[in-house]
Image (tube, grey):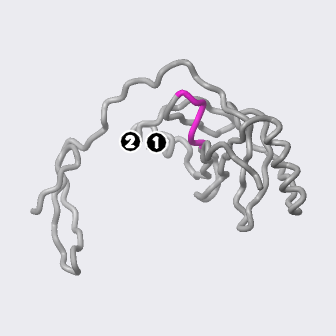
Amino acid sequence: MIQIKRVGHVGLKVPDVDRVAAFYENIVGLEISDRSDGAVFLRCNDEHHCLGLYPAAESGLHHLGLEVHDSEALQRVRTSLGQQGLELVPDEDPHPGIGESACYRDPDGNLLKFYEGMKHIDQPLLPREPNFPTKSRKYCVFKGGEREVVTTFPFGLFSAA
């Protein structure tokens, strides 16, 4: 059985990398750490990235990054998955910030990227101001089958209209 250290990062396919990167940076609060061949990498801590955004025609999972403990563990992944009849998938996309990697597909075709270690960034994350709405907005919600108009105020507070 393979032993991974942790689920380390996620790669997403997106039609508009800049638009989606702006969402994750300005709304979610991640910080862009790198750009490479049209892809954008964002971080939430001292590691190089937790999210990679890759240009594609349709949205979806690009890959799931699974960190292993060391190079010996990565070799055990290759051996174990090879014994299961899985073939190594060429890693053709840029992926800065990680150590040596090996890619395979799960039974549903999702790309798994097993990798050894991630680069740490010594620079702390930049402080960010919350990006809360400044105007109230009205939304219709359904509670128990009945329609109710709800107003949202700055800072996400709700009030019945």
Instruction: Pick the residue in front: 106 or 17.
Output: 106
Inter-mark Cα distance, 1 to 2: 6 Å
> Element at badge 1?
helix
Looking at the rendered structure, the secondary structure element under dot 2 is: helix
Residue 24: give its label.
Answer: 1
Counting other residues with Cα less than 10 Å from the Cα at mark 1, is it few (<14), some (14-19), or many (20 or more)? Answer: some
Indicate the quadrant containing the N terminus: top left, top right, bottom left or bottom right: bottom right
Q: Which residue is mark 2?
A: 27
Amino acid bearing label 1: Tyr
* Residue furthest out toward the left: 161
145 vs 74: above or below: below
Could you tell me which residue is drawn at 11 percent across and 62 percent down?
Answer: 160
Measuring from the top left, give residue 92's x and y in whole percent. Answer: 79, 44
113 to 42, vertically: above or below: below
In the image, is 138 to the left or to the right of 32? left
Q: Which residues are magenta?
A: 46-52
Q: Main secondary structure of the magenta part?
A: loop
Q: Residues within 10 Å of mark 2 (few under 14, many from 20)?
A: few
The x and y percentages for residue 119 are 65, 27
- Residue 85 sits in which quadrant? bottom right
Q: Is residue 95 magenta?
A: no
Residues marked 1 and 2 touching at CB (< 8 Å): yes
The residue under label 2 is which amino acid type?
A: Ile
